[in-house]
Image (cartoon, coloured by chain):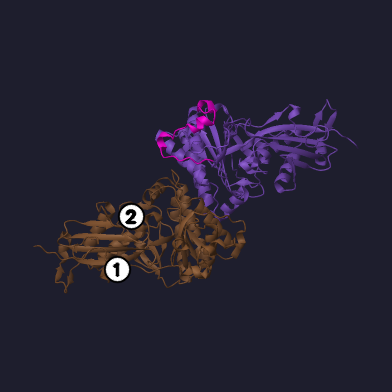
Chain colours: A purple, B brown
Amino acid sequence: MGEKWVLMKTAQTPTNIAVIKYWGKRDETLILPVNDSISVTLDPAHLCTTTTVAVSPAFQQDRMWLNGKEISLSGGRYQNCLREIRKRAREVEDKEKGIKIEKEDWEKLHLHIASYNNFPTAAGLASSAAGFACLVFALAKLMNVEEDESQLSAIARQGSGSACRSLFGGFVKWIMGKEEDGSDSLAVQLVDEKHWDDLFIIIAVVSSRQKETSSTSGMRESVETSLLLQHRAKEVVPKRTLQMEEAIKNRDFASFAKLTCADSNQFHAVCLDTSPPIFYMNDTSHRIISHVEKWNRSEGSPQVAYTFDAGPNAVLIARDRKAAAQLLKRLLFSFPPNSDADLDSYIIGDKTILKEAGVEGMKDVEALSPPPENGAAQKCPGDVNYFICTRPGKGPILLSNENVGLLDPETGLPK
Amino acid sequence: MGEKWVLMKTAQTPTNIAVIKYWGKRDETLILPVNDSISVTLDPAHLCTTTTVAVSPAFQQDRMWLNGKEISLSGGRYQNCLREIRKRAREVEDKEKGIKIEKKDWEKLHLHIASYNNFPTAAGLASSAAGFACLVFALAKLMNVEEDESQLSAIARQGSGSACRSLFGGFVKWIMGKEEDGSDSLAVQLVDEKHWDDLFIVIAVVSSRQKETSSTSGMRESVETSLLLQHRAKEVVPKRTVQMEEAIKSRDFASFAKLTCADSNQFHAVCLDTSPPIFYMNDTSHRIISHVEKWNRSEGSPQVAYTFDAGPNAVLIARNRKAAAQLLQRLLFSFPPKSDTDLDSYIIGDKTILQDAGLEGMRDVEALSPPPENGSAQKYPGDVNYFICTRPGKGPILLSNENLALLDPETGLPK
């Protein structure tokens, strides 16, 4: 035929951090969890995935590039997402370009996909959550899919469980569902990103010398071998989920912090109860927890909640900017950079907090005193690679500016 | 009156390591646990407490010296043990010395007690278990108490829970009991130290930079805050205890290892599930576990079981001398001593194993190759302070040699 038109859409999605954790599937293929989970969406200004999807009769096969490198789409997870979204494709017309795609044309057309994370994969910051959410969202836009975000989340879920929670901003709940076919296992928004505006988040990207156990194999081993996991899923999480929703709706930080820390620790407890045991947190992670616990207890009421995913990175959620500034000082005292680093690359993301902390350069870091509640605190330079400052953020959006597209609008190949 | 006679007895007791863990009390005063526990007694030749108890009308008050330093006996635990053992005192006659103590005399007489551990308290090797067991055993001998070891264990239990298990050699079970008064919460011997003669134990005393949470307060916090603890106590441990007894009786090392490692990990999981979370194991502990898990899996059948108490020290139980020798080679490769140490102080206890391992000096350590199953294993000099080699051992004994007494037979004061 020789048709050479290319239709493209570019979307951007945030990543998310679970405060009530997902760990364990009741169905490996459909990715159905053994319990509900709740997450906070992080501001895509600092951490996000950008994905351009393109369709053209000239494309010979489905292809995808991730962070500039071509990857295979043959795996079950990609195939599931592509199949499910294609099922829901509808007629698309671009009058300007004189292109019309009928519903039944989609199954014969091939896609080019380019995706890019603005944060390193090695940072252990759940890039697949943002990635699959973006893929599904972008394709839904391209294919004029009617389904809403919750229904799209059920598709993203089949790429990566936690991806379903990246279809919304603010605080999000992934309802575990009851159906065998997973049709009711999807994400809903609890509150949007403006609801709890005060919260400020600091992520400590911790040095890790070893390759982590992947979440997928780790949680399968936990389901198979941990005698505590089922009790957690059946008895603990249902109650905690209710309490957490309540805390979020009421902006009750004390309850939120207690639940968040407890659930993070219990998730890691289940990992330890697995055979072979899985250790995601290391001595630095433990030190951070100890510091936060000490500070919270000395203040009488929690200032900071901590939570850790399947890696040593600490996600610290401060109750407000004032607490965040004090937290940052404590963190910089205990975890200064190695001597040759500059502050500008040691603290990235929302840097406005530096001013409130009175820390504008390395001299200010060196001048910090030990915190009052922990006069014997040691310095462990180099234990943290860098810090990312961010806030709760919004859900996926379409980018209309064609310059941000990752594929060339003529060739459909990566720019 | 002016009587100046002194009657003395000296006893020696072993320490023990739990393979099914005790963690959590249902009664703080009587020290009654929430589940059964099972332990292996370690050879007192390498790790033991020696206690001399003396009685004399010339003594003005009960006094005790621990490792040469006088300590207070006013605490509840010491008072409970002294009261309970005194209740059971009977008539004692030493015809040679012309001394006769009537049953009713005991309540008016005072005691001097001197106790000495041949291993450092800082090694975190449960010195209070051996200590209280020795105290009770020695006093029972001095006071001609009729009760057997199990009944004595119920008294030692009130000094320190795990002390009750040090009244026997071999493998011992502390039955949790049902009675409110704790009369049925006591230790019984499962098998003696000859039953499973092949086992060889290597303890890695790991460098710890921080003060550990005490077992007493730690387990109380776990009972109060861990939502997984009760499930462990009610559902998991009862079944595991039965399986463990079976494995010990049958000398089924594969099952023994699986249960031992699982129970150690679950105990630490409950510690992590506590608020605030308790981290007893550190990165070095985790590394040791990873190495052992890798080796066990590469051999197809477990060679070594690991277990950790309330601290970072690893207790490694090898199935036989051959496995122990190979374990030692692996440990010394990954955890060599710092350069100025000599092997003789780096490996203490039963050093015969060094010959089996072909390691007679530091040159042999430096010449070690990485293990076949872990070719990229790193070296961490200084992560381990030293190793103690030992074997399952016998229970408490009376020492007849007066030279070994810790108190002067004339003054009743420490030598």
Dot placed on the residue nearer the N-terminal end, 2 or 1: 2
Residue B155, given in percent of the width and then of the height, sits at 29, 60
Circle on res. B276? none
**Which chain letter goes with mark 2?**
B
Give A205 or B340, whichever is nearer the viewer: B340
Name the residue beneath numbered marker 2.
B31
| B283 sits left or right of A113 in the view | left
Task: Please check whether the numbered discs 2 and 1 fall on a single chain.
Answer: yes
Name the residue beneath numbered marker 1.
B148
Considering only vertical position in the picture, is A196 above or below B306? above
Considering only vertical position in the picture, is B319 above or below A164? below
| A226 sits left or right of B194 in the view | right
Rendered residue at 54%/66% (across/down): B326
Q: In whole angstroms, how far apart are the C-alphas of marks 2 and 1?
A: 20 Å
Secondary-structure class at tag 1: loop
Residue B160, given in percent of the width and then of the height, sits at 33, 56
Q: Amino acid under label 2? A: Ile
Crowding near pointer 1: few (<14 within 10 Å), some, many (20+)? few
| A278 sits left or right of B218 in the view | right
Residue A392, given in percent of the width and then of the height, sits at 57, 31
Q: On the image, which quarter does residue A3 sit in?
A: top right
What's drawn in magenta, residue-wise? A353-381
Secondary-structure class at tag 2: loop
| B332 sits left or right of B134 in the view | right
